[in-house]
């Protein structure tokens, strides 16, 4: 997963906008390097696709067969186990997968004229906005 990034600036701020669809602010980590000049944004977009070789407790559900008239003479039919219970399996097949998933990490060089003690970030509708305040040069 490689999020799309927009970098912009105005007179008083630098901005970083990162498209992070499906992520919450708790799933995104921001770190400032020890020398305060590298900002790293990282996280992970987890897959929603079930892989056939991974077993999940939600892959099958069992519904009880409520035939109480002849409980001693139960026949095993196709789709039923020995106890007369019907088994359902999740056989979802994907014809196209265009979404990307996985861990990501993006690093940005912070200009010298940024107040690194006042970096603000907000997450709204899957877009992370980081605001870096510029230090005004002395007059």
Image (spheres, rainbow, N blue to C red):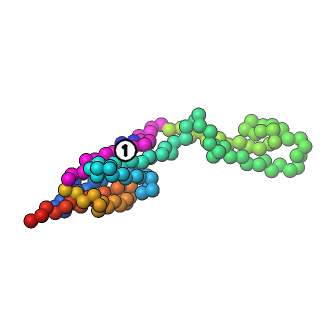
Residue 21 falls within the magenta-colored stretch: no
Residue 16 position within the rendered picture, expressed as x and y whole percent measured from the top left: 28, 53
Residue 25 position within the rendered picture, expressed as x and y whole percent measured from the top left: 42, 57
On screen, residue 91 versus residue 3, left or right, reads: right
**Position above or below: 114 against 104:** below
In depth, the one of 119 and 26 nearer the eye is 119
Q: Quadrant of the N terminus?
A: top left
**Residue 53 found in image quarter:** top right
On screen, residue 51 versus residue 62, left or right, reads: left
On screen, residue 119 versus residue 135, left or right, reads: right
The residue lying at 44 percent from left, 53 percent from top is 27
In depth, the one of 121 and 45 nearer the eye is 121
Residue 89 position within the rendered picture, expressed as x and y whole percent measured from the top left: 65, 41
Q: Residue furthest left?
A: 139
The residue lying at 90 percent from left, 43 percent from top is 72
In depth, the one of 57 and 117 nearer the eye is 117
**Residue 59 found in image quarter:** top right
Mark 1 secondary-structure assignment: strand
Residue 100 position within the rendered picture, expressed as x and y whole percent measured from the top left: 41, 41
Residue 100 falls within the magenta-colored stretch: yes
What residue is disc 1 on? 105
Q: Which residues are magenta?
A: 95-112
């Amino acid at each position: 997963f490689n999020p799309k990034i927009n970098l912009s600036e105005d007179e008083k701020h630098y901005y970083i906008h990162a498209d992070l669809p499906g992520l919450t602010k708790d799933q995104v980590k921001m770190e400032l390097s020890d020398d305060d000049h590298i900002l790293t944004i990282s996280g992970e977009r987890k897959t929603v696709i079930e892989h056939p070789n991974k077993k999940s407790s939600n892959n099958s559900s069992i519904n009880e067969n409520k035939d109480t008239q002849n409980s001693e003479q139960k026949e095993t039919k196709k789709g039923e186990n020995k106890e007369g219970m019907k088994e359902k399996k999740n056989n979802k097949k994907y014809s196209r997968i265009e979404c990307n998933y996985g861990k990501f990490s993006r690093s940005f060089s912070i200009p010298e004229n940024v107040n690194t003690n006042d970096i603000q970030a907000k997450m709204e509708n899957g877009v992370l906005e980081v605001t870096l305040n510029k230090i005004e040069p002395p007059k």
